[in-house]
Amino acid sequence: PPLQLGNWNLLEILETTAASMILLQRGSLLSSNIGETEDGEMDGYSQSDSIHRLMNIPPLKNILPLTATLLSMMRRRQVMIMKKKNMTNTTSKQQLQKQQQQQQQQIIVKKSISILLQELMYHH
């Protein structure tokens, strides 16, 4: 479906752009000269290495990959929201149908009772 930008606020776009940038940089963020020591500890790795790399990403020479990733993520989010709304609508429709069926059953029961009472009164 076409992307509906009117449904996005600035903060959502910024968050999605940041997530897109992380996705594009994930290889460099996760790679380093990491090795395990004999006791299973990580050698040559500090928890701040990835954050340091993320904070020092050089400017992009080409923004097309970032734009493509951003638009893809925005479309996925929009599809998820639409599916959620459809599920909610389907659930609401099902609940409405169930209520209507119950009301129809109540009407049938009331009519049946009325007919039975009339039959009893007519025969006595």
Image (tube, helix red, strand yellow):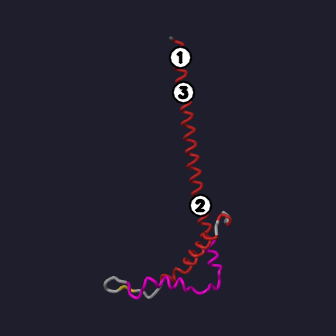
The residue wearing badge 3 is 110
| Residue type beneath disc 2 | Ile
Q: CA distance from mark 3 to mark 1?
A: 14 Å
Q: What's the residue type where badge 3 is placed?
A: Lys
Q: In the rendered view, would you say 73 is above or below 121?
A: below
Is residue 95 or residue 7 the one in the foreground?
Answer: 7
Instruction: Name the kind of residue labelled 1 in the image.
Output: Glu
What is the span of residues highlighted in magenta in the rendered image?
A: 42-71
Q: Is residue 28 left or right of residue 68?
A: left
Residue depicted at x 55% and y 44%: 95
Query: Within 10 Å of the Cα at label 2, are there few (<14), some (14-19), or many (20+) other Cα atoms?
Result: few
Task: Name the residue beneath numbered marker 1.
Answer: 119
Q: Separation of disc 3 and disc 2 at Cα?
A: 43 Å
SS of the residue under disc 2: helix
Residue drawn at 59 percent across, 51 percent down: 89
Image x and y of residue 73, in percent: 59, 70
Secondary element at tag 1: helix
Q: Position of residue 112 (x, y in %)?
A: 53, 25
Task: Check residue 29 for magenta coloring.
Answer: no
- Label located before the other in sequence (3 or 1): 3
Instruction: Give the class, few, some or many, for how many residues have Cα within 10 Å of label 1's Cα (few <14, many ≥20).
Output: few
**Residue 38 locus on image (x, y percent):** 31, 86
Q: CA distance from mark 2 to mark 1?
A: 56 Å
What residue would you read off at disc 2?
A: 81
Can you name the residue that lies furthest to the left here?
39
Where does the image place residue 45, in percent across and percent down from the top left?
42, 86
